[in-house]
């Protein structure tokens, strides 16, 4: 995987319109149109609880996954919010993101924060 062609989207705002009209729309179209070779959405903070509790969010997650978007969540956040198992059951990878995020930033890899 070449990080220059891999977009990471750090999703931190628990808002349904932001999910639908930015996160889902851009990531899905990015793969569909070949704008990026790979796209990963990182669920961080309050969005972990939002994802675990709101069926419309879960539908958006499923839609992105079906389009080939990789979904991953911050394990520290999911553990603290008590939603790790729920996100894993949705097919979301749950890992500690501190080191990987720091690497992306230091390498100036494409990172979009929403």
Image: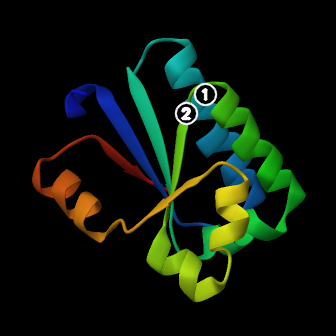
Image spot of residue 109 (x, y percent): 21, 42
Q: Which residue is labeled 1 in the image?
A: 28
Which of the pair 86/13 is nearer the observer?
Answer: 86
The residue at the far bottom in this view is 80
- Element under disc 2: loop
**Which callout, 1 or 2, points at the residue further toward the start of the chain?**
1
Q: Is residue 14 visible?
A: no
Q: Quadrant of residue 87?
A: bottom right
Which of the pair 74/15 is nearer the observer?
Answer: 74
How many callouts does the rendering have?
2
- Say which of marks 1 and 2 sits in front: 2
Q: Which residue is labeled 2 in the image?
A: 69
Callout 1: few (<14), some (14-19), or many (20+) C-alpha neighbours within 10 Å? some
What quarter of the picture does the N terminus occupy?
top left
The residue at the far left in this view is 106
Q: Residue at x 57, y 26 (%)?
A: 68
Question: Does 70 appear above or below 82?
Answer: above
Q: Residue at x 69, y 74 (%)?
A: 49
Compute the Cα span from label 1 to label 2.
Answer: 7 Å
Image spot of residue 106 (x, y percent): 11, 56
Q: Is residue 16 visible?
A: yes
Callout 2: few (<14), some (14-19), or many (20+) C-alpha neighbours within 10 Å? many
Image spot of residue 114 (x, y percent): 50, 56
Q: Quadrant of residue 60?
A: top right
Q: Report the side of 11 relative to 61 (left or right).
A: left
- Disc 1 and disc 2 in contact, CB within 8 angstroms: yes
Image spot of residue 108 (x, y percent): 15, 47
The residue at the far top in this view is 33
Q: Report the side of 92 relative to 56 (left or right).
A: left
Q: Residue at x 78, y 54 (%)?
A: 57
Which of the pair 82/45 is nearer the observer?
Answer: 82
């Amino acid at each position: 995987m070449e990080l220059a062609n891999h977009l990471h989207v750090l999703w931190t705002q628990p808002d349904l319109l932001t999910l639908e009209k930015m996160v889902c729309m851009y990531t899905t179209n990015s793969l569909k149109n070949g704008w990026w070779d790979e796209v990963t959405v990182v669920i961080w903070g309050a969005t972990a609880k939002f994802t675990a509790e709101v069926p419309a969010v879960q539908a958006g997650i499923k839609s992105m996954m079906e389009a080939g978007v990789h979904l991953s969540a911050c394990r520290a956040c999911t553990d603290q919010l008590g939603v790790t198992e729920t996100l894993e059951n949705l097919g979301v990878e749950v890992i500690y993101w501190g080191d990987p995020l720091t690497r992306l930033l230091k390498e100036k890899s494409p990172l979009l924060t929403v």
